[in-house]
Amino acid sequence: VKRLVIKVGTSSLILPNGKINLRAIDQIAFTLTTLKNEGYEVILVSSGAIGAGLHQLGLDKRPTTISKQQAVAAIGQSELIKIYSQRFQSYNQAAAQVLLTRDVVDYPESRRNVINTIQELLEMKVIPIINENDSVAVDELDHLTKFGDNDQLSAIVAQLSEADLLIMLSDIDGFYSANPMTNKEAKLFERITEITPELESAAGDEGSRFGTGGMSSKLKAAKRVFNNDSQMILANGRDPQIIFDILEGKTIGTHFAS
Ligand code: ADP
């Protein structure tokens, strides 16, 4: 069995007008269910709680205080998981919610509990939907509870679950020599075998409006993946069925493998 971790970024889940991208969520549910029925073990790491919460409340930007952001995340997370559950159910697939904070995976006993839960869910043929527990961890300065962002979270989940492959779906076709939004000369890297300082400077540090990680955080995640002798593919999540092509071995996005 191949074990996959699929990470979907905010940019793929929240439309530019702030609404939840229901079509994307439906396609994610369809694609992941199909993969599971084909014999893959599938774990989803999904962002979007704060985006969904902002939409629920009719706000167009994050509140300024941390406690308000946490409240927005609590509202959005339940809305998001409700939509995922409904979409998965329509394909006769059960899903489960697992919310994590950094301290939980740093502390050996709770770390073991997380590993066991994920393992058990996979044996039950259920798809775990994992997110950072933003209701207790949105403060970027709080390194005890915060993973940093969901790129790091997905790499840590891939590590905990000993996944064969981490697929990151973003709003861009892969990792380029410069930000393609601002540089027309930028070239897509098809394969990256190690993270060099040149790549790190190509990543810059700006992400999309709703995304938080940006490319430097994807490289940081890739480093962790390399350290675990695993692999990562960064691809465009516009059409989540791209995952089928990736698993057929087509050259898509950027393949991080040593
Ligand atoms: P997500 O929400 O999917 O995690 P991010 O917004 O964090 O996505 O990161 C994707 C964005 O990173 C792209 O839309 C692009 O504008 C920007 N970016 C900056 N540098 C690069 C680069 N070298 N290659 C690709 N994208 C880049």
Image (cartoon, rainbow, N blue to C red):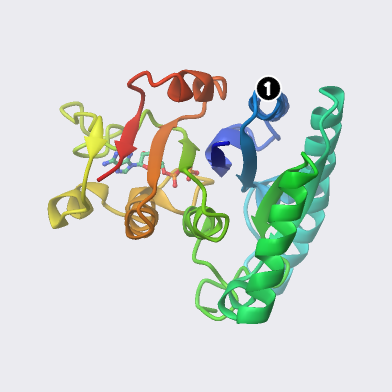
Q: Residue at x 54, y 37 (%)?
A: 2
Quadrant of res 80: top right
| x then y, percent, for residue 237 | 51, 29
Helix, strand, or loop for circle 1? helix
Q: Quadrant of residue 23?
A: top right
How many numbered markers are drawn?
1
**Residue 76 shows in this picture:** no
Image coords of residue 89 (percent x, y):
86, 30
Residue nearer the viewer, 73 or 96: 96
Mark 1 sits on what residue?
A: 34
* 28 w.r.t. 18: above or below: above
Q: Residue at x 47, y 59 (%)?
A: 152
Rendered location of residue 194, percent (x, y): 21, 50
Task: Please state, as top left, top right, bottom left or bottom right, where the N terminus lies in the image.
Answer: top right
Image position of 101 with respect to 129: above or below: below
In percent of the image, x 70 and y 23: which residue is there?
A: 30
Q: Amino acid at mark 1?
A: Thr
Q: Is residue 12 above or below residue 111?
A: above
Rendering quadrant holding ligand 1: top left
Does the Cβ of the disc 1 residue fall within 8 Å of ligand 1? Answer: no
Q: Is residue 91 left or right of residue 138?
A: right
Q: Dot 1: few (<14), some (14–19), or many (≥20) neighbours within 10 Å?
A: some
Please determine whether, in this image, residue 57 is positioned above or below residue 159.
above
Position of 14 compared to 250: left or right? right
Q: Going by the picture, which residue comes out furthest to the front?
A: 1
The image position of residue 239, as x and y in percent, is 54, 20
Name the foreground residue: 241 vs 116: 116
Q: Is residue 156 visible?
A: yes
Instruction: Pick whichever, 44 or 75, lies toward us.
Output: 44
